[in-house]
Image (cartoon, rainbow, N blue to C red):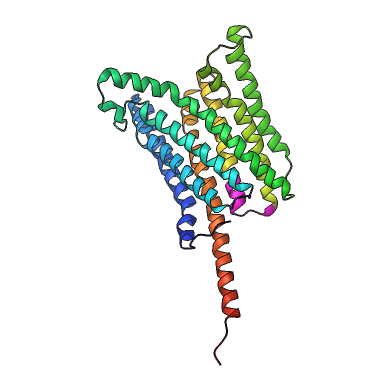
Amino acid sequence: MHSEPSDAEPRIANLPRLIFLIAAAVIIVGVAAALAWWRTGDFVWVQRFFSYPGALFLVACSTAQFCLSVQCWRHFSPGDLLRPAWFLISLSALAQLTGGVVTQVLATESRLNPLTALPAPLKQTLVRWAAESGPLFSPVYMLFLVFGLFYVLKACRQNGILGRFRAVDMLLLGVVAAYTVDFFATVVLAPHRGVPESGGQKILSWTSDPLLCILLFQAILIRRSVANMGRGLIARCWLSFTAAIFATSVGDIGLWAWSRGYLPVFLQAASWYVWFLASAAYALGPAYQLQAILHATARGTRRERMDLAVAAPHPT
């Protein structure tokens, strides 16, 4: 593991608290916008929230996730199983960031969108392209994350700390798996009498839910594995990833239930804010991992300085 100056440790230590506070503030603003909508009947309150503070928060979380994941990758030495793990997690974060910029900025009519400065025909074409292409980044980031978590599980197995599932874990997996089966039965296969609609983009978008099932399986198993090491920063890292993946699953289920008319209005609105929790949790994962690395490095550096002080010749 590479070493870095220990003065970065206090700054990284404050990151999780900062992420929590900003996420709480954004959700409070979002709830206020929803209340204003219910009170006035004007949906523009919610629209402006998601177009500006909501979009900025989602992109900022993805940016933080990517930068922190790259820092984690850089701290692991070649040959360490966690080095390729964090490299793939970094690529996953980059795909999330790209998809967030495309979906939250370029596919909207907000003032944040630089495409609005282009001539109208070109702007409409590019905005339409962004709206169609943005969702395709979801299965890409999930696939990178699946391979990254595979290396983490491999490291857990080699170190003899691979955990086991509990009843509550099986319940969570069962809920997400049941939703995935129902989605394919009612959306993918049923309208075409068992023959899925062709088209690369459509097929790629269908892979998101099965990949989410795999990710949830991996994340829960990693969480149970590192829990054997105590409730420290590493455990918080993978608890954050588990929470992010589960929140993403809840968000997908909410969108599906909303489109089918299964949710009342207040639950529909509540499901929109799950994505902010997922984004914050994705950023918290590498923040806790980097904090653990810097803490261990600083502790090792202090121990080395003490050893040098003891070994140094004393004047007589």
For residue 188, what is the image quadrant?
top right
Looking at the image, residue 131 sits to the left or right of residue 1; the answer is: left
For residue 139, what is the image quadrant?
top right
Q: Is residue 111 magenta?
A: no
Name the outermost residue toward the bottom: 316
Query: Closest to the observer: 233 or 178?
Result: 233
Q: Would you say the magenta stretch is mainly helix, strand or loop?
A: helix
Could you tell me how many numbered marks the image carries? 0
Q: From the viewer's perspective, is residue 292 above or below residue 309?
A: above
Name the outermost residue toward the front: 78
> Which residue is painted at 32% across and 19% down in the image?
124
Q: Which residues are magenta?
A: 229-239
Looking at the image, residue 138 sits to the left or right of residue 108; the answer is: right
> Which residue is painted at 68% across and 29% down in the image?
174
* x then y, percent, for residue 135: 47, 25
Query: Closest to the observer: 46 or 82?
Result: 82
> Which residue is painted at 58% across and 48% down in the image?
237
